[in-house]
Image (cartoon, helix red, strand yellow):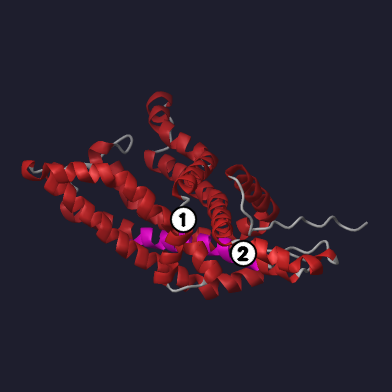
Amino acid sequence: MRAKQKQRIHFAEARTASELISANSAFVRQNLSILVRSVAVIALPFILIGQIGSAIPQLLMLEQLNMPFPGFEFSFMQFSELPEGIGVPDYFFSFGISLLFTFIAYIGYILVIAINYEYIQLYRAKSLEGSNDSAVSNRQLYRQVFSKVYQYVINLLVVVFLLFFVFAFGALLSLFGLNDRFNILFWLAILFSPFFLIYILLPFNFLFIVQAVEGFDVVANIKRSFDIVHEYRLSTLGYLLVTFLIYTSFSAIPLLIYALLPFLINFTGIGLPVFSLMLIALLLQVVLNTFASIFLFNAIAFKYFDLVERHEGVGSYKKIARIGKDLAKPNSAYL
């Protein structure tokens, strides 16, 4: 008996928010095996090394401080208040090591993004070919990711550089606002922060999928990201907020464990040291967050195609152009 063929997902369609979530869920379920396997092989080692490496110096210092659980009091502790045996050089050495490993973790996260978006490109290419076999091999995906990942890194570095100056300017305004003579600047910064979040930061969510699909340079990618969100900012913001809530629900278990650790330590007399408990909770959180991000990044990709379709109708035009041809091939996909 012939195996049932998987139904292909069309990307270039205008969809409502519920249709976008449904299409994304169907796509992730259909392709979960290769996406999880690829993320586990390529990206997860960088993320685990980076996250654990950045956390260990901090956890060891917390244990030296005899703190049962990391609280805000340590984060805001003055250097003059550091206990005997832990000096300022130790504090900065710990911070420097954590920063280095955080950079390694970010390489892993960039690889997760590249895996998702390059897989979408290969999937769409297979669909456009009209091949009965729409499966993408691991070798194809790995080759595509490693040949394009530098483009994602360049985009990230430019965006981080730009946002650094924007946030630094905002922080400078806030500092001036603390002075009575410049108090108006502080309230202006507060007043315009929602505008900043919606107008400036929102389009950057689509930067990497624009890079994957359209392949512009960094400046053109940023401009394109702003163009497609134009006129749909509030609906896009609402969709992304719902998507992010779904994403966080996937990783709620380790966060719950993390939140309950103080009570477990204080009231149950668990024999494991704080360091071990924190490390276990961190591992669970990192692994689940990484795999849950597959849903998040693909949701952004579906919204990108939805916005492009609403602006330009690319998928509709190609459907019309291919109607005659596709009547003879009812199983073929448009985009």
Per the image, label 2 sits on a secondary structure element best described as helix
Relative to 181, residue 150 above or below:
below
Whether residue 111 is visible here, answered yes or no, is: no
Q: Where is residue 46 in the image (x, y as percent from the top left)?
A: 47, 61
In percent of width and height, residue 263 lies at 40, 27
Residue 280 visible in the displayed image: yes
Tag 2 residue: 314
Instruction: Write the start and end of the magenta stretch as one range.
Output: 100-123
Between the residue at mark 1 and the residue at mark 2, the CA separation in whole angstroms equals 16 Å
**Which of the two discs, 1 and 2, labels the residue nearer the N terminus?**
1
* Residue in the image at 23% along x and 46% along y: 189
Residue 229's disc is 1
**Camera-side residue of 210 and 228:** 228
Q: What element carries label 1?
A: helix
Residue 309 locus on image (x, y percent): 59, 58
Q: What residue type is labelled 2?
A: Val
Closest to the observer, 204 or 55: 204
Is residue 318 found left or right of 117 in the rendered image? right
Q: Quadrant of the N terminus?
A: bottom right
Name the amino acid type tagged 1.
Val
Residue at (65%, 45%) from the top-left corner? 22
User: Do the numbered discs 1 and 2 sit on residues whose CB atoms are within 8 Å?
Assistant: no
Residue at the location (83% across, 66% down)?
A: 329
